[in-house]
Amino acid sequence: MYYVITYDIPEPYDHIRNKLARLIMDYGFDRIQKSVFLGKARYDTVENLAIEIEKVLGEIDADVRIFPMCSTCFSQVVIVRASGTDVRTPLVPEKEIVVVV
């Protein structure tokens, strides 16, 4: 299953944000935006990641969301970019629709 992980961490906690990003990437997720990650993992792996995320966050007022995405839904992802660069990555299936504006 694919997963999208997003987070919103308040400004004074840059060190927590950096630690969280490293943790998520250590679990094999790719950073696709500053606070958005994409990867393929088993559910039990995501559960373990969620436990580790809780430990990193401690008591700070932060919001981390982990969204599951089935392969069928993932194959219908539309990427919109302002440039005509090749946006394919190893995680993006061949059926990807790319809209360039």
Image (cartoon, rainbow, N blue to C red):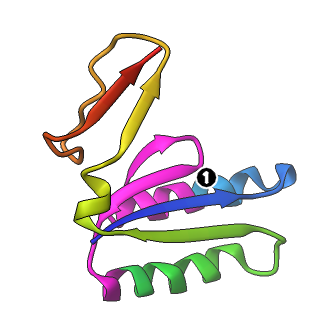
x then y, percent, for residue 25: 40, 57
**Residue at horizontal 66 percent and vertical 55 percent from the top:** 17
Give yes or no for residue 96 being in the magenta stretch. no
x then y, percent, for residue 4: 45, 60
x then y, percent, for residue 91: 23, 48
For label 1, the residue is 18
Considering only vertical position in the picture, is 74 above or below 56?
A: above
Q: Nearer the viewer, residue 41 or 76?
A: 76
The quadrant in which residue 39 appears is bottom left
Q: Quadrant of the N terminus?
A: bottom left
Give yes or no for residue 22 being in the magenta stretch. yes
Residue most extreme to the left: 94
Can residue 28 be seen in this snapshot?
Answer: no
**Residue at horizontal 74 percent and vertical 80 percent from the top:** 58
Q: Is mark 1 on a helix, strand or loop?
A: helix
**Residue at horizontal 74 percent and vertical 50 percent from the top:** 14
Say which amino acid is labelled 1.
Asn
- On the rendered structure, is 93 left or right of 38? left
**Residue at horizontal 47 percent and vertical 64 percent from the top:** 23
Considering only vertical position in the picture, is 65 above or below 47?
A: above
- The range drawn in magenta is 20-45
The quadrant in which residue 92 appears is top left
Considering only vertical position in the picture, is 48 above or below 9?
A: below
Number of residues whose C-alpha sits closer than 10 Å to that of mark 1, classed few (under 14), some (14–19) or many (20 or more):
few
The quadrant in which residue 64 appears is bottom right
Considering only vertical position in the picture, is 40 above or below 11?
A: below
x then y, percent, for residue 10: 83, 56
Can residue 84 be seen in this snapshot?
Answer: yes
